[in-house]
Amino acid sequence: MKRRPIYGLMAEFETPEQVLAAAHRTRAAGYRRIDAFTPFPVEGLAEAVGFEWTAVPIIVFGGGLLGGLTGFGMCFYANVISYPWVVGGKPPNSWPMWIPITFELTILGAAIAAVVGMLALNGLPTPYHPIFNIERFRLASTDRFFLCIKARDKKFALEETKTFLQDLRPHGVYEIED
């Protein structure tokens, strides 16, 4: 029987303090492609696994800018180019009256960009993930804490990484097949 490729190695811990200390030691050992799974947020764990920056604010700004320009451009086209009508002596290019629609489309564009950007950057929806093949991973939503070192890490070598994870004194170390 042919062996499937390895996605990575995962260690199971019993307390948030253990997984946090393990994440710090893993990062200090030079591993960069690591991830942690916990049933509740653990203070400092995101920084420990190397999650420091996200592109969501830039995506939201771009969506808001595009929405605002769309709202302003739509009003400009309708009132100045397509149907220039002088009402009450006001010029067709009376931009102060376009502020509400410009604001509304700015907020709409930013909100849509935030949702789509967050989903895309998180790789969602993910109906299948190799980690779901580990039987004990179902405990990640109740009372266990998991730390995963991915095989695409430059420092990853199966036996050395497994020995490293076992030195962290986890409840168990599991191979994740892709």
Image (spheres, grey):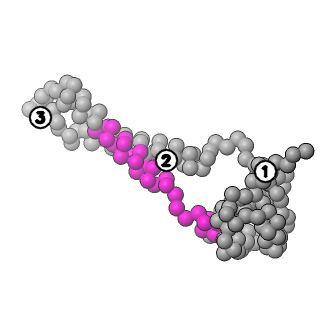
Residue 124 at x, y percent in the picture: 62, 44
Residue at image coords 56%, 45%: 120
Residue 157 at x, y percent in the picture: 76, 64
Residue at image coords 52%, 43%: 116
Question: Which stretch is magenta?
Answer: 45-72
Above or below 125: residue 31: below
Q: Comparing marks 3 and 1, which lies closer to the viewer?
A: 1
- Nearest the eye: 10 or 63: 10
Point out the tag, 3 or 2, that comes first from the N-terminus.
3
In the rendered structure, does residue 64 fall within the stretch colored magenta? yes
- Nearest the eye: 162 or 98: 162
In the rendered structure, does residue 24 fall within the stretch colored magenta? no
Decide if residue 147 is in sight here: no
Number of dots carrying numbers = 3
Q: Comparing marks 3 and 2, which lies closer to the viewer?
A: 2
Label 2 sits on a secondary structure element that is helix
The amino acid sitting under disc 3 is Lys
Label 2 crowd (10 A; few <14 / some 14-19 / many >=20) = many
The residue at which mark 1 appears reads as: 5
Look at the magenta stretch and give its main secondary structure.
helix
The residue at which mark 3 appears reads as: 90
